[in-house]
């Protein structure tokens, strides 16, 4: 039961508002200002240029390449994660020998920071001394060593695969929560009516999981869109900006190339994209549990 | 289908994924325990000829692991305190009251949670530079506090809502003031929720990368994550045995804690929309 109060609750949420307005709000204001002005290398604001920085950005081919690559990155990682996580969750939800062990293994990548995961993979993929080459050669799948990360066409799919690998645990956990809330008796009824396992999957499990899939979809899209460490540690968006996505290119614009105005404009573009994602999610989440909206 | 056969099929189906997940751990362990002359060879073996536990000692001294560890503990510990200090009252207010502007506040929390620091990194850096906080723990503590606040508030709110308000009301009837009931009735019941939230926030900040990479400039102030990254980021010749030993040491304790508590994580990450 919740009581109606006007003043006291605001006192309670006050500190959190103050902290967020200061640490998150002020940088937003600062980025807006920088985006609308000419900014020198040292961060000093010069003349007001209106949409000038946005126009520079729109004329930058690397920005557009990173933009399309971000789209590919997000769709591939999120799509791959969802498609793999549904059967994984169904297996983990079933009863079999060694289920506890398998659950721990599947959840492991979540427990390790992305930075560490990426560092270990970078070493594993090392062209001369890496164990990936060695293992593939031992298995007879490879004749000679490959420099996995030296070319973007090879490095980027690897980064996508690692992105999928680290996104599976969270997604599977969401689906497991969904599966455990499905009523068991309708499966019994469907089995008695002679529905095959595949029919039960497509006609019962998938539709009932639908809300959980939607939520995992949007949350993963936000996480993956923002994901920085994997690409930064493995290739730094190189060779020749060939694996840059928006977040890594933004970082380079701001801290390597000193194009502060352009970087600020780019921040705002990405902020807008995230805001759209967030509003979609908010609508979905609040539709699921209307009483939580308050 | 009988159970052993089904189990076998499941394990076979999952085998590729299991291999991909376990592979990096095997590499970490193998490299960390190898003598150097068995690492940089063209035909590396999985098993070292002898176990070089001394790699860990050498690594500890060479990269000043202790200092980075202390930095990480200070930054993460203080961020958690700051985060809880603002999230506990906010979570309580959200769980116990209905008030004008509540749905607006929910949306506000959601936006701050979904907004990754990377998108605002330039503005954050410029602000911290103006304040003179760059390269100081306080810059990270403030940023971590602010960016983890929403997650902590969701977690706490959803747990606080499960503590019956009747208990507090009974205390009021018995003449306790609001503050007394809060301290003697509510908070003791909320301890488990506080602990889980604190630990998960701690792990989040411990693993954070981009803010630490940007706001810390000198090796003396690096957190563990950045210290280890700096070993592979800048150096021309990388001592991978030390890197792997450090990675293992930095990862393992947090991984164990996290593996134990990850099921609670979903609650805070999905705004109570997923049961």
Image: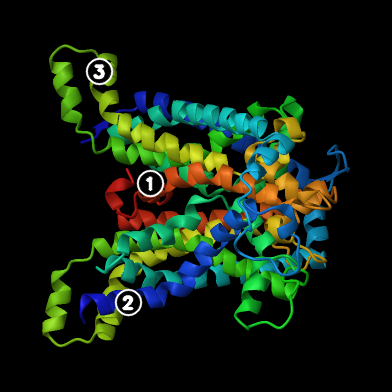
Q: Which image quadrant: the C terminus of chain B?
A: bottom left
Q: Give the label, 3 or 2, closer to the camera.
A: 2
Name the element at disc 3: helix
Residue located at (60% from left, 35% from top):
B143
Q: To which residue does mark 2 refer?
A: B8
Circle 3 packing at 10 Å, graded few (<14), some (14-19), many (20+), is: few
Residue located at (68% from left, 72% from top):
A133
Query: Which of marks 3 and 1 precedes in the sequence?
Result: 3
Q: CA distance from mark 1 to mark 3?
A: 29 Å
Q: Give the label, 2 or 1, closer to the camera.
A: 2
Query: Which of marks 1 and 2 precedes in the sequence?
Result: 2
Residue located at (37% from left, 33% from top):
B195
Name the element at disc 2: helix
Q: Chain of mark 2?
A: B
Label number found at residue B260? 1
Q: Are marks 2 and 1 in contact (CB under 8 Å)?
A: no
Q: CA distance from mark 2 to mark 1?
A: 26 Å
Q: Give the label, 1 or 3, closer to the camera.
A: 1
Residue B194 horizontal/vertical position (percent): 36, 32
Query: Which of marks 2 and 3 precedes in the sequence?
Result: 2
In the picture shown, does residue B121 fall above or below A102? above
- Identify the image's colour scheme: rainbow, by chain, secondary structure or one colour: rainbow
Q: To which residue does mark 3 refer?
A: B184
In the picture shown, does residue A118 fall above or below A193? above
């Amino acid at each position: 039961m919740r009581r109606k109060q006007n003043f006291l609750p605001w006192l309670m949420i006050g500190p959190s508002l103050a902290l967020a307005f200061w640490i998150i709000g002020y940088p937003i204001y600062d980025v807006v200002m920088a985006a609308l002005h000419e900014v020198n290398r040292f961060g000093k604001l010069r003349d007001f240029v209106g949409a000038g920085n946005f126009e520079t950005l729109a004329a930058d081919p690397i920005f557009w390449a990173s933009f399309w690559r971000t789209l590919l990155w997000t769709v591939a990682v999120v799509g791959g994660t969802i498609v793999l996580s549904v059967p994984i969750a169904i297996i983990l939800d079933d009863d079999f020998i060694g289920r506890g062990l398998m659950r721990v293994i599947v959840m492991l990548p979540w427990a390790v920071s992305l930075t560490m995961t990426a560092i270990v993979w970078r070493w594993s993929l090392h062209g001369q001394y890496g164990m990936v080459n060695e293992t593939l050669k031992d298995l007879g799948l490879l004749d000679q060593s490959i420099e996995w990360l030296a070319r973007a066409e090879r490095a980027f799919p690897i980064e996508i695969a690692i992105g999928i690998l680290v996104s599976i645990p969270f997604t599977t956990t969401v689906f497991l929560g969904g599966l455990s809330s499905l009523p068991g008796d309708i499966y019994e009824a469907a089995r008695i009516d002679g529905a095959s396992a595949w029919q039960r999957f497509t006609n019962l499990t998938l539709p009932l999981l639908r809300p959980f899939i939607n939520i995992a979809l949007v949350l993963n899209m936000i996480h993956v869109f923002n994901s920085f460490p994997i690409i930064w540690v493995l290739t730094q968006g190189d060779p020749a900006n060939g694996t840059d996505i928006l977040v890594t290119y933004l970082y380079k614009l701001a801290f390597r190339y000193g194009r502060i105005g352009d970087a600020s404009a780019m921040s705002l573009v990405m902020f807008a994209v995230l805001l759209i994602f967030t509003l979609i999610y908010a609508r979905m989440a609040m539709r699921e549990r209307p009483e939580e909206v308050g | 289908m009988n159970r052993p056969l089904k189990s076998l099929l499941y394990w076979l189906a999952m085998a590729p994924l299991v291999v991909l997940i376990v592979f990096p751990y095997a590499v970490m362990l193998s490299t960390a325990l190898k003598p150097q002359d068995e690492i940089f060879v063209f035909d590396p073996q999985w098993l070292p000829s002898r176990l070089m536990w001394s790699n860990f000692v050498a690594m500890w001294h060479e990269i000043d692991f202790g200092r980075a560890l202390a930095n990480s503990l200070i930054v993460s510990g203080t961020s958690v305190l700051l985060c809880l200090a603002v999230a506990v009252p906010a979570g309580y207010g959200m769980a116990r009251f209905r008030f004008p502007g509540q749905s607006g506040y929910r949306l506000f929390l959601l936006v701050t949670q979904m907004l990754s620091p990377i998108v605002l990194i330039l503005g954050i850096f410029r602000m911290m530079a103006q304040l003179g906080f760059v390269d100081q723990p306080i810059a990270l503590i403030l940023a971590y506090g602010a960016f983890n606040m929403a997650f902590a508030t969701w977690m706490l709110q959803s747990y606080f809502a499960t503590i019956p308000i009747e208990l507090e009301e009974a205390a009021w009837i018995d003449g306790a003031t609001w503050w007394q009931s809060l301290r003697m009735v509510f908070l003791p019941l909320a301890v488990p929720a506080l602990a889980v939230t604190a630990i998960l926030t701690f792990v989040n900040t411990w693993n954070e990368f981009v803010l630490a990479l940007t706001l810390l400039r000198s090796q003396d102030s690096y957190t563990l994550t950045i210290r280890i990254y700096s070993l592979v980021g800048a150096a021309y010749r990388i001592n991978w045995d030390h890197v792997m030993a450090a990675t293992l040491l930095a990862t393992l304790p947090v991984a164990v804690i996290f593996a134990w508590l990850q099921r609670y994580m979903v609650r805070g990450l999905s705004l109570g929309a997923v049961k």
